[in-house]
Amino acid sequence: MRPLPLTLGTLFALTQAFAADIRVTPNEAVDVAQDGKIVARFMMAHDVSTPDKRLETYKPYLHVFDASGAQRLTKGPGFLFTHHRGIMVGFMKITVDGKTYDRWHMKGGDQVVTAINPTADGFVAAIDWQGESATAKPILTEERTFKFTKPTAPFYFGIEMMSSLKPDHSEAKIDGDPEHAGAQFRPSEKIDGSKTTYVYPGKDVLIHKVKDLTWVAEVFTVEGKTFTALLLNHPSNPKDTAFSAYRDYGRFGAFPKGVATPESPFKLHYKWLIAEGDIRDPAAFQQAYNAFAGANEPTPVVTVMTAEQTKPKAPAKK
């Protein structure tokens, strides 16, 4: 496996700029430190030497930690739904040249990081989305940019992600469903699903039907400690975006769909703000969104929903 080239390359209001401490271990991970503590880790190993190794490393994703750096808040491989991992991007139905590919469950192909370029406040990952084989041209090439911020209270960490997906020569239809596509956040396998709660902007929001929410918040408990994750949906994102934000195991995020061409990539732009504790403050959520989106919208009434409980399931078979 070839080594990854490394090159060093306005934060919005409500954040304090900090020079992200980015440490790259080629072909393994990118660590992001804040105040000397690891608060995020981008997992990018790709090892196909055995079926088990491939299962562990077939997609890159971002782990998130608590403010002390001691507790991992997000899930890796294995456990319930092995393909759910940290902050991830994927789509179950990608159609190119009449053929459809599943790059959510990673059936028959992987997402492979080919380069990491650190920046002053984060890094850019170049990622190949494989087609029918590892030697064929990828169906999509992605530029996934992360920028990290230190927000004001109640949040301790901000993760801004921009993704640009481009096919090599043909049109790519990017699709799926809210459960199996988009940009998603998956809490740790040690989550207490009985305590998972969601907050939506608006009165009596029907989350299975609503589209284009400006933000969604999740309150979740891992190993007895409660955290809040706020997802901000930038207005430049594709319209008619649905949201999956109701599962007790905590996987939540946005499902956009559209068409990408070499001249017009499919672009996404989201931000996650992480807080310790049970935060249900619509004013703080809306203020964060306004700063991110350059908007001036008033604080909305909100809908608070306890997660839909699911029956226990055995770990997915390898």
Image: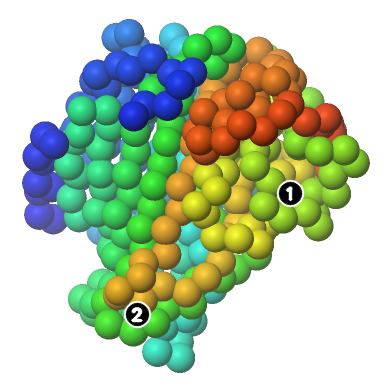
Question: Crowding near pointer 1: few (<14 within 10 Å), some, many (20+)?
Answer: few
Q: Residue furthest front?
A: 296
Q: Position of residue 20 (x, y in %)?
A: 27, 22
Q: CA distance from mark 1 to mark 2?
A: 31 Å
Residue 176 in which image quadrant: bottom right
Residue 191 in which image quadrant: top right
Residue 267 vs residue 187, the one in the foreground: 267
Q: Residue at x 71, y 29 (%)?
A: 298
Q: How is the image coloured?
A: rainbow
175 with respect to 192 (left or right): left
- Quadrant position of the N terminus in the picture: bottom left
Say what amino acid the circle numbered 1 marks: Lys
Badge 1 vs badge 2, beta-carbon distance below 8 Å: no
Helix, strand or loop for disc 1: loop
Asked if residue 20 shows in the view, the reply is: yes
Depicted 79 relative to depicted 65: above or below? below
Q: Position of residue 195 (x, y in %)?
A: 78, 26
67 with respect to 41 (left or right): right
Residue 181 vs residue 71, the one in the foreground: 181
Residue 187 vs residue 157, the one in the foreground: 157
Q: Position of residue 85 (x, y in %)?
A: 50, 44
Which is nearer the N-term, disc 1 or disc 2?
Answer: 2
242 with respect to 189 (left or right): right
Q: Which residue is mark 2?
A: 132
Say what amino acid the circle numbered 2 marks: Glu
Q: Which residue is mark 1?
A: 313
Number of numbered discs visible in the structure rendering: 2
The residue mark sitting in front, 1 or 2, is 2
Depicted 206 relative to depicted 279: above or below? below
Q: Position of residue 108 (x, y in %)?
A: 41, 73
Q: Residue at x 32, y 44 (%)?
A: 145
Asked if residue 47 shows in the view, the reply is: no
